Image (tube, coloured by chain):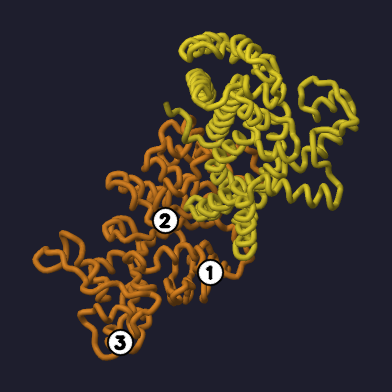
Amino acid sequence: MTLLEIRDLKVYYYAFDGVVKAVDGVSLELESGEFFGLIGESGCGKSTLGNAILRLVPPPGRVAGGSIYFQGEDILQLPEDRMREIRGDRISMIFQDPTAALDPVYTIGDQIVETILAHNPEVSRKDAEARAIELLKLVGIPGAEARVHEYPHQFSGGMRQRAVIAIALANNPELLIADEPTTNLDVTIEAQILTLLDELRRKLNMSILLITHNIGIVAEYTDRVGVMYAGKLVEVGRTVDVLTDPKHPYTRGLLGAIPGRGGRKGRVTEIPGTVPNLANPPPGCRFHPRCPRRFDPCDQEEPALVPLPGEGRMVACHLYRRLES
Amino acid sequence: MLDSDLLRLIGRRIVGLIPVMFGIAIIVFLVFSFVPGDPVTMLIGKQSDVSEEFIQQLRHKYGLDRPLYVRFFYFLRQLIHGDVGISYQFNRPALEVVLERLPATVELAFFALAVAIVIAIPAGIFAALKGGAVDRGIVGLSVVGFSMPNFWIAMLLILVFGTTLKVLPISGRLDVTLTVERVTGFYILDGILAGDWEVVRSALSHIILPALSLGIPAAALIVRLLRNNLISVLGAEFIRAARARGLRESAVIYKHALRNALIPTINIVALQLGFFLTGSFFVETVFAWPGMGRLAVDAIYARDYPVVIAAVMISALFFVLSNLLADILILVTDPRTRGVR
C-alpha cells in the first residue's frame, strides 16, 4: 500500500541573489512499512525534501509546486492547524544533531509528555508520564524511570538520539523521517541507533525515510533507495539492484568513491568537477558537465525519470531512453 | 539538586560579601583622606565669624587633628563593630541617616523595574515575532530610549505631564498636606497599612514620573536584548523540532523560545535593578525625591565621608543582592547551571 506519494515537488529558496531550486520536480512513492533511503551529496536537496513533507521548510524556502499525498490526502493543501495535527502524530522527524533538537531547559520526560498531550488532550498527565517511561524503555535507555526526569545535557550523545527517537515515536507515527540521524554519532553508536530504528519499524509497522550521504548504511538497512543529484531524483529502485548494478553515471560515480569497492583495482575514484550552483543549474541534465558518458542531448534536454526492467527501477538518464526506444 | 545548589550559592555570596564591604569602606576612607577640603571647613561654610579656636575644637572632636594612620586604625576598629561613624552634617550615626533615606530609593527602584519589565517584555516579543516594519520601529524607539539620559527624560515628562497637562505631581513623594505614620518607610505600603487611600493615591501619582524616567532607558535596553535573544532562539534547531512534534505555535513560542531567550536577559535586568537601588542622583534631584543617591552626592560635597561610606556600602550590598537574585533566577530557569561546582 502506498503511504506517501510525492508528485513533481518543487521547493525553492528565494534568496537575495536569485531563486535556489533545492528540489526541482521530484516524484517519489513510499510504501507502508518500508525502509527507504534517500541518498545524495550535501546540498542536493534531500533534507529540503524531508522538511517539505512536514511543511517545515525554513524561510526563505517555499514549496513552489507539486503535491504530497499522505494516505491519499494532499497535505500541501491542508490548513496549518490540520497540518499541525499530522506533525509528530502521524509523521515524525528526527534530526541530525540530537543536542540541538532538544530544548535544553525541559526534561526529556516533559518533552515526550507535551508531544503526547499536544495530540491527545484527553490523556492525563500521569498516563502520559507512564507512556514516556515506556517509550524510553522501548528505545533502550537504561534506568528509564529516573532518566525521564533528567535534562538533555545529562544524556550522552547516543542516549540523546535515543531520546529524540522516543519523542518521535510518542504517538505511533506511520512515517518517520530520519534526517542524517547518525552523522554526529560515532560508528558503534551509529550501528546501534540504526538497528534500533529497523527493529522499531518492524515492531510498530511504520515506514522510515532515511536521508543520508552514507552509502554503507543505505546498503545495510534500507529496502529501497533513491539517489538525488542537484535537486533531482536521478535513480530509484530496490537497494540491492541499485547498489549492485547502478545505472545512472552519477550513482556509479558515487559507488566508485567508496573505499574498498568498485573503482580500478580497489582504488577509490572520484567524480570530477563540483556540484552545480542550484541558483543557476546547468541546462539539460544537471550532471552532464561532470558525466563521463555525456553525448548529444545531455546539455540541452532534461532527461525524465523512466522505468527500467526490474521491480520499481527508474532512472533519469538519456542513455536509457535511447535503449528504451 | 536545586536546593543544595541554592544553598551553596547563597552561602558563597554572603561569605564573599564580607571582604567586599570591608574593601569598599577602606577604599572610600582612604580616597577621602586625600581629597582636598575637610568636613569642618565645609560645615562652617561661608560663616566668617567662627573663631579659629572653635574650628580646632571641632576638628579635635571628630578626630581630624590626628595623623592618618591613627584615624585609619580607629576607623577599622569601628568598622569591625559595624559602625561607620557619625555624620558631620547631621551629627547622628551615618548608617542611620542612610537607612532613613533607603525606603524612598527602594520604592522607586521597584516601580522603575516594573515599568521596565512591563514595557520591555511585550515589546521585545512583539518585535521578534512580527519582524519587518514593526521590528524596525521598536528597535528604532529603543535606540532613542537608551540614548536619552534619564534626567532629560525626566525634564520632558515634567514638561508634558507636570506643567502642560498638569495631571501628575512633579516633586516629592507625597502631597505636602498629607502625612502618614512611618512603619515601613514605603509610603504606598504605609498608606495601605493605615487604610488611608488618599495617601496611597498621592504616593502613587508622585512615583509615576520618576519611575518612568528611570524605567524607560532600562526598558529600551532590555527590549533590544530580549528581541535579539528571541530571534536567535527562534532560529534554533529545537524550535523547528518542537514544530515537527506538532506543538501549537503558542507553546513553541511561549514555552520553548521565550524561556530560552529570557535566560541571558536576566543578568541585564538584575544589573538595571542594581543601578536603580543605588539611587539615581539625577532623577532624585529633578524630582526632589529624598533618596539615597541624592544624600550620597550631597555628602560628597560636604566631605561627610561616614555618610558616603555608609551609602556606598549599602549600594554594594544591593548590587551583590541583585546579582544573587539573578543567579537564583537563572538556577531556577536553566537546568544546565545546576549541579556545577
Q: Name chain A's colour.
A: orange
Query: How many neighbours does mark 2 have within 10 angstroms: few (below 14), some (14-19), or many (20 or more)?
Result: many
- Distance from disc 3 to disc 1, alpha carbons, whole Å, reads 33 Å
Do pointers 3 and 1 mark residues of a single chain?
yes
Query: How many neighbours does mark 3 have within 10 angstroms: few (below 14), some (14-19), or many (20 or more)?
Result: some
- State whether residue A288 is above or below residue B212: below
Q: In terms of sequence position, does the residue under pointer 2 or pointer 1 come before the other?
A: 1
Residue placed most toward the observer, A15 or B314: B314
Amino acid at the residue labelled 1: Tyr
Q: Is residue A59 left or right of residue A242?
A: right
Q: Which chain is yellow?
A: B
Please state which of the two labelled residues, at mark 2 or mark 3, is closer to the viewer.
3
Q: Which residue is mark 3?
A: A299
Please state which of the two labelled residues, at mark 2 or mark 1, is closer to the viewer.
2
Q: Chain of mark 2?
A: A
Amino acid at the residue labelled 2: Ala
Position of the C terminus of chain B by quadrant: top left
Residue B11 in view (yes/no): no
- Distance from disc 2 to disc 1, alpha carbons, whole Å, reads 19 Å
Q: Which residue is mark 1?
A: A69
